[in-house]
Every structure is written in structure tokens, then in C-alpha cells.
Amino acid sequence: MIADFKGKTAVLTGAGSGFGLECARIGASLGMNLVLVDVQQDALDRAEAEMKAAGAAVLARRVDVAKAGEMEQLAQAVAQRFGAPHFVFNNAGVGAGGLLWENTIADWEWVLGVNLWGVIHGVRLFTPMMLDAARKDPTWKGHIVNTASMAGLLTPPNMGIYNVSKHAVVSLTETLYQDLRLVTDQISASVLCPYFVPTGITQSERNRPGGSATAVTRSQMIGQAMSQKAVSSGKVTAAQVAQKVFDAVTADQFYVFSHPKALGNVQSRMEAIVDIRNPPDPFLERPDIGAQLKTALRAA
């Protein structure tokens, strides 16, 4: 368990908005050193100014988390400024939908690059630094939080690339948790699986390489519209989810959910696997969503 955050260092990717920004705000209020990472410069600049005004020691870097070289330079900068980080929030993420066979290579590379490779780079670069710090100081404690999604535990249609990326993050983080348990009692891990929370992820295209020049299919437009409606109507805020994350880190709780009631859909999926039945409706508790999607996609 971790009780004291004051003076500790946290690396936060996707720190310019959503969960990353809200976690940074909590970190600043707790007296933490903050490494703010985002690919959108103006959002990063605003976050940096806000955290410095709150009294936090800040290192801000514009980084594309999908790029190994940029992440390696980030890790070096963190080591030079603050040493090994106590907390790493691999939070940067983008959203994309559409029918699987309509997605382009560029679609796959973009989403997997940010959502999966960003997490991979964060884990492979910062975990060794944290383990080294733990070996040198038996009182040193650390924690890694990877942001997945409820889409990492479900398989909703018309958002296959996103599902694949987030399932991979869940698997990666579960394995990370087990691997850490083998070698240390001083560092742990959690996976955040939010559902529909207003964070800005539905406007991910603003930071996509090529941006508006990228062709959009009809199924992607339908998926975008439905996701935007669902997320914008979400009642749970990013700030509330960020507090859940810090509570989980404090208690060494692995799974972090924004909407625990949505676990009924996860349970039905798991039961189907164990019973060797075909996959159930992923919208079992909200069948109207699946019906609307089917109607929209089958319309002439």
C-alpha cells in the first residue's frame, strides 16, 4: 500500500486532457513532481502552466508515445531531472471505429501505435528504472497504471481496432502485475477500464497523422456519432475516475472501473467462454444500442 505521495514523481502520458490531466491535478494537490507528456502542444502548454501555478515541479515534453526514439529521450530526461519515477500513468489513447474489414493499414498503425505501443514503451523504459531504485532502497515504493477500457474486456461491434488495442493493454498489464510479483514486493500495477466518460477521446482525429486528409468510411462515421453521443451523455466525470485511480494505487487494487455496474456484460462474456457458447450480445444490458447500430449499418 502507498500512503504518501508528497515529493514523489509521476509520469503521465496524455496529460493534456481527460484522465491524464485530472490525475495531474490530483498529483499537484498532493505535492508531487509531475512529468507531463502529450502530443498536442497547446494542451500540454496549458497543463504545464496550470500545474506550475499549483506549485508542482514540472517537466513537460511533447512526445508521440508510439515512437520508440521519442519515448527513450523522454525516459532519459526524466532520469536526469527527477531520477526514477515512483508512478507511471500510461494513459495516452485514441479512439477509432468502423467495421474491421474496412479499416486501413494506417488506421491499425495509428490506434495500435498510441494505445498499445505507447503502453509498451512506457513499461519497457520505466520499469527497469523503478526496479533499480527499489533495489537500492528497501523503503522505495512504485506503481504503474495502464489505461485500457471496458472495450478491453468486451467485444462491441464496429470498433474492432480499439477493442484489439485495449484487450492487449489488459493482457499486458495483468502479465506485468504477475511479473512484478515474481521479482519485487515494492512495485505493483493497475489497469484502468473506463466506460463512457467525457474525456475528449471521441475527438482523437485532431491528433492523427494526416488528420482530416484521411478518408472516413460510412461505418466509421456511424461509430463516431454513436460514441460521441454515448460519451457526451456520461454521468461519471474524468475527475471522479482520476480519484478512483489514486484510491486504487493507495490500496494496491488492480482493476479500476468507472462504471462497475457494466461488469454484467463482462460476466456474460466470461460465462459464455467457460460454457463454450457463442459470444453473447455485448449490449445485453442496453439492447437498444445494438439495435440502433444494426439499423444504421443495414440502411441503404
Image (cartoon, rainbow, N blue to C red):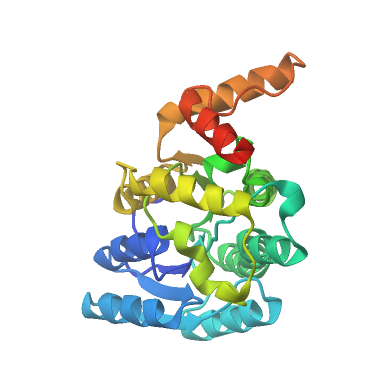
Left or right of 130? Residue 45 is: left
Seen at 40% across and 40% down, the residue is 258
**Does residue 97 show up?**
no
Residue 294 percent across, percent down from the top left: 59, 33
Residue 125 percent across, percent down from the top left: 65, 70
Q: In this picture, is 287 found above or below 190?
A: above
The quadrant the C terminus occupies is: top right
Q: Which of 167 and 212 lies nearest the eye of the viewer?
A: 212
Extreme residue in the top direction: 275
Number of marks in the image? 0
Residue 76: quadrant of the picture: bottom right
Q: In this picture, is 228 found above or below 62?
A: above
Q: Which of 173 and 81 lies nearest the eye of the viewer?
A: 173
**Does residue 140 show up?**
yes
Left or right of 237? Residue 68 is: right
Seen at 34% across and 80% down, the residue is 48
Seen at 40% across and 57% down, the residue is 19
Q: Which of 11 and 266 lies nearest the eye of the viewer?
A: 266
Residue 293 percent across, percent down from the top left: 55, 36
Q: In this picture, is 252 found above or below 286?
A: below
Residue 39 percent across, percent down from the top left: 51, 77
Seen at 34% across and 57% down, the residue is 4
Q: Which of 40 and 48 lies nearest the eye of the viewer?
A: 40
